[in-house]
Image: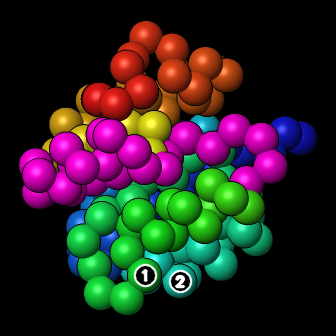
Amino acid sequence: MAQPFEILILDDEHDAADMMAEVLSLHLPQAAFRVAYTGEDAVQRGIAHRPGAAIFDLEMAGLGGEGAAMALRAASQGSLLLIALSGSVSRLAELRKKGPFDHLLSKPVDVAQVVELLCGCMRGGQFAGDDRRT
């Protein structure tokens, strides 16, 4: 039996991370979701489970979403779709110039847009139909 497509969600706000996983699982029942609440935990889970996609909140104490994404990007073997979430438009603008993320989304996030990005990745077209810096 084929392994499910794995998606890693990182947010230090437990309710936000858990809700994102729950909502996305309704739209993507064929995927497996893992949730991390710290950047360090996200890196450990990402290295251990090799997700196909990761959705990271940027602002948090300790190792933030950007640092965790850089570590996973360096450790990934093959493709890894990295999506950043932030309420800071200026932070997203900085990352558009350079950064480890494939897509940058502002909060509150449009779930339909996230589902579309993940579906494209699951079909094998990681960046299909979208600018890498959404």
Position of 16 with respect to 69 (left or right) is left
Residue occupied by mark 1: 63
Q: Nearer the viewer, residue 67 or 12?
A: 67
| Three-letter amino acid code at the position of disc 2 | Glu
**Is any atom of residue 9 visible in this view?**
yes
| Three-letter amino acid code at the position of disc 1 | Leu
| Quarter of the image with the N terminus in it | top right
Disc 2, SS: helix
**Is any atom of residue 10 visible in this view?**
no
| Quarter of the image with the C terminus in it | top left
Q: Earlier in the sequence, mark 2 or mark 1?
A: 2
Q: Quadrant of residue 21?
A: bottom left
- The tag on residue 40 is 2
Disc 1, SS: loop
Q: Residue 70, how many percent across, how many down?
A: 54, 61
Q: Residue 133, how many percent across, how many down?
A: 34, 31
Q: Quadrant of residue 56?
A: bottom left
Residue 44 belongs to the span the image colors magenta:
no
**Residues in magenta, as a range:** 76-100
Residue visible at 58% across and 26% down in the picture: 126
Q: Nearer the viewer, residue 64 or 10?
A: 64
Tell me: residue 96, above or below residue 117. below
Tell me: residue 130, above or below residue 86. above
Q: Do labels 2 and 1 touch, CB within 8 Å? A: yes
Q: What crowding class fits label 1: few (fewer than 14 Cα within 10 Å), some (14-19), or many (20 or more)?
A: some
Residue visible at 41% across and 64% down in the picture: 66
Residue visible at 30% across and 40% down in the picture: 96
Numbered-mark total = 2
